[in-house]
Amino acid sequence: MTRQERTAWLFSAPVLAIIALVFVLPTTLAMALSVTDYSIYALADWANLRFVGLGNFVDLFSTPLFCRAMANTALFALLGVPMAIGTSLAVAMLLNDATVRWKPLWRVLLFAPYVTSIVATAVVWRFLFNERSGLINRVLATVGLAPVDWLGDPHTSIPAILIFVTWKIFGYNMIVFTAALSAVPQDLMEAARLDGAGRWSRFRHVTLPAIGPTLLLAAVMSVAGFLQIFAEPYVMTLGGPAQSTTTILYFMFDEGFKWWNLGQASAVAFVLFLMILALTMIQTRIGRRYEWL
């Protein structure tokens, strides 16, 4: 090993140690616990710990609430990812317009929700969605619409939470898209405009190919984020009504810290890990296959 290689490993060692401590080690332990019946009783007496193999996974997929949680999580991701990315990209393109004034101010204001406390903002939005005194229903009343029980109706609970989540996170992708749009070759945009291409054609054939890698990154991060959604339904609905907002992570939290079935909670974590890994690989493969991505 050369001196330069030793120096590189020396500088990389602290970061690698932190990664091993906070990611590799917990992941390995969770995988080990997922094949045991580790529970609150094993905390007191390790002799009670038994190897159950795939028993936890079999029990999971035969549990109706877990299947419901998977369906809810899939719905959050299917609706939330296009909603969040579409909003971020649309706002970024508006701010990229040369006619918009005070761009730095708008970027700071729109990015601010992303760095606020998720619990505090969720509590505020829970009051906004209140059926009797919420501001949103008051606005609907001014146009003659009946009040909606946003968080108390299984049909509107997920859309209500998605509105909050989109407001909360879209600022991050907006900043990323703004940086990507600033790198779009303006000579190509001008050439397309002179050739008679409309706004949609310029967006489809010039802007999308230029921001494709950024769009793929945003999609991967957004899918992973929506699959791990927890704090929003925990604060706003407690998984209700009628378990309509119970997600995989919420189910894992209940199993691990409410019922102390830590072995089964670890199995849930492993299933979620495999889901995110599989979807990330699929998205990456799609991104490599299509040039505009």
Image: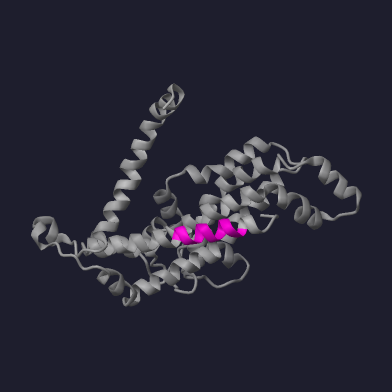
Residue 251 screen position, x and y as percent: 33, 65
Would residue 168 be found to the left or right of residue 34 on screen? right
Judge whether residue 269 is colored magenta. Answer: no
Would residue 224 be found to the left or right of residue 191 on screen? left
Bounds of the magenta segment: 276-286
* Total labels drawn: 0
Locate the N terminus and report the quarter of the image it occupies.
Answer: top left
Locate the C terminus and report the quarter of the image it occupies.
Answer: bottom right
* Residue 56 visible at all: yes
Closest to the observer, 21 or 106: 21
User: Which quarter of the figure has residue 181?
Assistant: top right
As drawn, 97 above or below 278: above
Residue 216 screen position, x and y as percent: 60, 53
* Residue 241 visible at all: no
Q: Residue at 68% across / 48% down in the picture? A: 211
**Dominant secondary structure (helix, strand or loop) of the stretch shown in magenta:** helix
Residue 28 screen position, x and y as percent: 30, 52
Q: Residue at 38% across / 67% down in the picture? A: 246
Closest to the observer, 101 or 97: 97
Judge whether residue 280 is colored magenta. Answer: yes
Would residue 253 be found to the left or right of residue 76 on screen? left
Closest to the observer, 103 or 282: 282
Closest to the observer, 22 or 239: 22
Residue 200 screen position, x and y as percent: 79, 57
Q: Residue at 46% across / 44% down in the picture? A: 116
